[in-house]
Image (spheres, coloured by chain):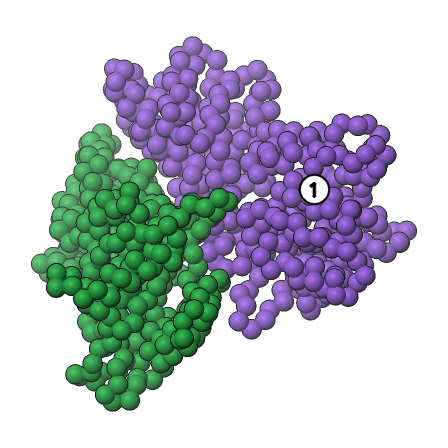
Chain colours: A green, B purple
Amino acid sequence: MEPGPPGSSGPVEPGPCLSGQRGADHAASAFLQSAAGTEPGRHSLAVAAVLPAGCGERMGVPTPKQFCPILERPLISYTLQALERVCWIKDIVVAVTGENMEVMKSIIQKYQHKRISLVEAGVTRHRSIFSGLKALAEDQLNSKLSKPEVVIIHDAVRPFVEEDVLFKVVTAAKEHGCTDYDLEFGTECLQLALKYCRTKAKLVEGSPDLWKVTYKRDLYAAESIIKEIISQEICVVMDSKEDNKHVGHLLEEVLKSELNHVKVTSEALCHAGRHLQQIILDQCYNFVCVNVMTSDFQETQKLLSMLEESNLSILYPVVVVSVHFLDFKLVPPSQKMENLMQIKEFSKKVKERNILLYGLLISYPQDEQKLQESLRQGAIIIASLVKERNSGLIGQLLIA
Amino acid sequence: MEPGPPGSSGPVEPGPCLSGQRGADHAASAFLQSAAGTEPGRHSLAVAAVLPAGCGERMGVPTPKQFCPILERPLISYTLQALERVCWIKDIVVAVTGENMEVMKSIIQKYQHKRISLVEAGVTRHRSIFSGLKALAEDQLNSKLSKPEVVIIHDAVRPFVEEDVLFKVVTAAKEHGCTDYDLEFGTECLQLALKYCRTKAKLVEGSPDLWKVTYKRDLYAAESIIKEIISQEICVVMDSKEDNKHVGHLLEEVLKSELNHVKVTSEALCHAGRHLQQIILDQCYNFVCVNVMTSDFQETQKLLSMLEESNLSILYPVVVVSVHFLDFKLVPPSQKMENLMQIKEFSKKVKERNILLYGLLISYPQDEQKLQESLRQGAIIIASLVKERNSGLIGQLLIA
């Protein structure tokens, strides 16, 4: 995929909005940056997207899944997020039935989606697409939408769409006139275009990830994939005191060795939280707050405040594990219990901000071997909490 | 699907082996019992199954998933279980590559599969099928296999096969000579049969559940479906003392109202465990053991012993939640902690038998309203433990 000759149109290099992305966009980001080049002043190709998201209930066909929740957030929101991440898609037009219009508006508001316009769906998918195209085609003074050169038609129930595939499709459309990239039955649109329009058309092969969420099993699969994506990084947060740093780094090492496919980083809570802000911007959804010889929650509360201010948890639930290394012999159990029971109250409060708070006690000091074993048990517990992201267990105090 | 005329061959009524089955077999069981009738002395149709389970690694095609674990058990074992449940399938022949032969034998042994024979796979799926058919066709004195009239060819990676579909296919094969029921691309075999053999053939429509586990997302989906199936029933176990029964039934009621799609039953631990044995036979995989005003584990240990003896946990992990209703003011916290820390040791021990043990404390007595709220919190925690079936959190003491 080379950039076109100088002066030709092609999608503009997306710029800083792709930096620091994680998970599904790694490949797309690298690909696009190499493909699009860095020529300044390049004309941009005007690209928009239309998402048919009507209900189209037909006999014997499963109910469309776009409003089904995954981690308490409707599937369509994930698809919108995937498209919004592509900076060179200027407008996203979603076609929904009249009765779903309000629901859709509240989804856009709650999850802070941008560049979205709504139109009324038709009785069939093709009529919904037509509805969306009309909105983009109209040259109205009060219309926010500008007329694009290429329109991407994308199902609301295909959340795992990546930028590189879209780039291929848009590029091919520019060259050939019309393309389709649906892997399974998507020659539908293509065949119609060939049959009814004097237009050339091309089929671009998509990845298996472009599959359509149709059955309940697909919702399950989508949920597992999304959970896997947001479990790829854990940040161990500690304050700068020597004891904390020592134990914190021990825990970090054990987490790295126990969890093969997870990136484990560590940050200090001080530094005016600057580095931590960056971690949050980089889309890390899992934090372990290390507290040594204290059962109070000051450090954890500082972290929670930063997270609440950051809006990180708008799109995905954020897991925070408050780890307390305690000498079980020194601290009276009843006091310990009282202090730690505060965690139940904190967890209810932060749940309203989509943050899942758990507590973990590790006995300390111990001889080195026992400590290693406790750290290993602690890592297994942390991994379980991150993987399951279960809201039923918030505020629990676990013991390694 | 009516039974054939008197004297004709058809699959024999399966008899008591289908009774009490749960989950995927409900529909099949009812269907078959009505279809097959209850005529004594009916000749049985000899039916066998061949499962191609070779590795067939081709460029660009995902690695076959039959040995991938779901809940720590290889996918192929679930498929074998589904076929074994069909009493009128007399022999199941699995074709595996030479290097997987030992692994396959250990799977058969560990999960106690029956009626399985192994043959060596060919380089292609069709050659593997041929290999299996040859083994069934050969009239050897020392062969355990009897020559069948109908052979079902079934992929090792389609675990959700139900008896009613197999019945349809076998019946159609008997009438038409050859059938295929693969929903997506399965006309492969059918086309070959039509092209190369002078045989009539028929295509039977299968259910969406017959999908093939091909990609990682399919493993995720299969795991979620299997977890859902084994989470459909919870049994609340209590001893016969009045206090226990009262609180136990309160918990049972709250569980029923919190968990819509779950069947909640209760049983007494005494009665020589006879009713409990039946629950275990009926494939209930989740138990809540109620203990009132005691932090010891005697009752829970009785239940665990019964479960260990029963072999219930061979195929699926069994969840046991030991619930303790305690007056937090009366029982000294340190004693409580010591007693309850035994749960960590118990849980490690029973984990070796694929039983996942968790503890749950609920404050009691309390005024009615607070108790209802604690019971509700307890139900949410129990539901989370049953749903996730997470081995990382065993031996933890949770508080409602």
The residue to which callout 1 is attached is: B167
Query: In the image, B271: left or right of A52?
Result: right
The one nearer the camera, A269 or B163, is B163
State the image coordinates of residue B72 (x, y, percent, origin top left): 52, 49
Q: Residue furthest bottom?
A: A6
Give the residue drawn at x 31%, y 47%: A97
The one nearer the camera, B317 or B13, is B13
Quadrant in which the N terminus of chain A is drawn: bottom left
**Among the 4 quarters of the image, the one containing residue A249:** bottom left
The amino acid type found where label 1 is placed reads: Phe
State the image coordinates of residue A266 (x, y, percent, origin top left): 23, 60
Asked if B188 appears above or below A392 in the picture, the reply is below
Secondary element type, mark 1: helix
Asked if B82 appears above or below A118 in the picture, the reply is above
Give the residue drawn at x 21%, y 46%: A106
Query: In the image, A284: left or right of B17?
Result: left
Using a 10 Å C-alpha cutoff, classify the residue at mark 1 as few (fewer than 14 neighbours), some (14 to 19) or many (20 or more). Answer: many
Give the residue drawn at x 74%, y 29%: B37
Quadrant in which the C terminus of chain A is drawn: top left
